[in-house]
Image (spheres, rainbow, N blue to C red):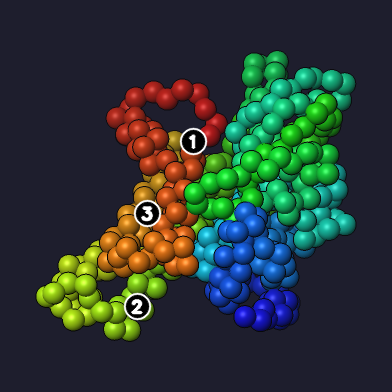
Amino acid sequence: MTDPNSRDLLPQGTTTEAQLVRVARALAPVVAAHAERTERERTLAEPSAEALREAGLFTIGTPRRYGGHGAGVRTAADVCAELATGCASSSWLVGIVYGAALFASQLPDEVRTAIWKSDPDAVLCGAANPSGSVTAVPDGLELDGRWPWISGIDHASWVLLGIVREDRGGPERGLALVPTSALTVADTWHMAGMRGTGSRTAVASRLFVPDEQFVSFAEIAEGIGIRRHPGEARVIFPLSINLPLVGTGVGIARGALERVVRDLAGGKRSVSPLHALTAEAAPHQLNVAQAATLIDTATLHLRRAADEIDEAARAGRRPDLETRARLRMDGSHAMRCAREAVSLLLDTAGASSFSDDSPLQRAWRDIGTASRHAALSVETSRELYGRVLLGRSLPHTDVV
């Protein structure tokens, strides 16, 4: 399949958020054409990476001041959903890069200029979970250790590393921005699903990070970004970061539904002695209907959450704890619905869909892996939401 000129997909002048979603829809078959190579190489295939870069989808979270789109969470989630119908790994990386750009946008202007002034298309990624060791040194920090499973590190110029530093008030979780060139990348990504995300391990040795390249989760939660950069939308941590990844799950399920419906409507023969065609069997009709309804449910929950986050972000306010717990539950529930839909569709598609050359088996593995990401755990989200609804206390945390 020949790739279109991706730059031509973007209209001249200011690109609207609706146009970005249409661009993603047009690119879905492009990244799908390289999905097998992406999985085989365990990193985003270069033609897919170039198509996404040329179409501007790696800059949807970059501030407009630096040539990016500064798109909202709803747009990022819809973009990821469209891309995932073609390639889940491509979609996930767009969501990761979006979130990393939101994190980096909270830093001072001199740091943002260093990132984006010379390279408006700069790709960022990161690992929010704290790892490694941190030593306070004059004017900054020194990092040592390993940060596993950083999606997109093969294509990134900058990486955000999750750390815990000692502050006067005690331990402080946050992110340190470092150039990828200062890290060693260990090839540790050998997984059943989402293989093409290239989520390898970053290794740092006595790496100096200036103070201005660190931002704490507490500062993000309290709105340091809009204080430093008036006029930009607030980042609602962690929901602004995580919800686009739910879009990947929804898109995986949509793509599976499209394939199964196409196969059945195209006259797939039934293995049952009761029916000549699979589409004539009531149990499979019910499976398809239930899967479609689960995908609709996932989409509605995701979009409700994303729209509420965007509204709060534009207003510069942080939703209250109960709302944040509910919106986290929205995202986790949407991901679980998407996973259940894919399982139902595989029941109907049958054992042949588990063949190595079937996109459905890849969808099954990808949704199984993506839906179990710690930030999207339905078990954790359900417990948090239940505790908040029942007035039970929560440990002090900046990640809810």
Whether residue 197 is visible here, answered yes or no, is yes
Name the residue at 73% across, 54% down.
155
Which residue in the structure is indicated by mark 1? 400
For the residues labelled 3 and 1, the Cα–Cα distance comes to 23 Å
Q: Name which residue lies at 63% across and 29% down.
A: 130
Q: Name the amino acid type tagged 1.
A: Val
- Residue 311 visible, this orientation: no
Labels 2 & 3 near each other (Cβ < 8 A): no
What is the secondary structure assignment of the residue under circle 3? Answer: helix
Give the Cα distance between marks 2 and 3.
Answer: 20 Å
Disc on res. 263? 2
Image quadrant where residue 323 sits: top left
Left or right position of 146 against 297: right
Q: Tell me residue 289's x, y (percent).
A: 25, 68
Q: Which of 208 and 268 is in front in this view?
A: 268
Say which amino acid is labelled 3: Arg
Farthest-out residue, left? 274
Task: Check the image and report above or below for 153 versus 77.
Answer: above
How many residues crowd mark 3 within 10 Å: few (<14), some (14–19), many (20+)? Answer: many
Residue 205 lies, with reference to residue 182, above or below; the image says: above
Going from N to C along the chain, the mark reached first, 2 or 3, is 2
Q: Mark 3 points at which residue?
A: 339
The percent coordinates of residue 333 (x first, y second) are 36, 49
x%, y% of residue 169?
A: 66, 16
Q: In the rendered view, does 298 fall on the left or right side of 77?
A: left
Q: Is residue 60 left or right of residue 73?
A: right
Q: Which residue is drawn at 66% across and 25% down?
A: 164
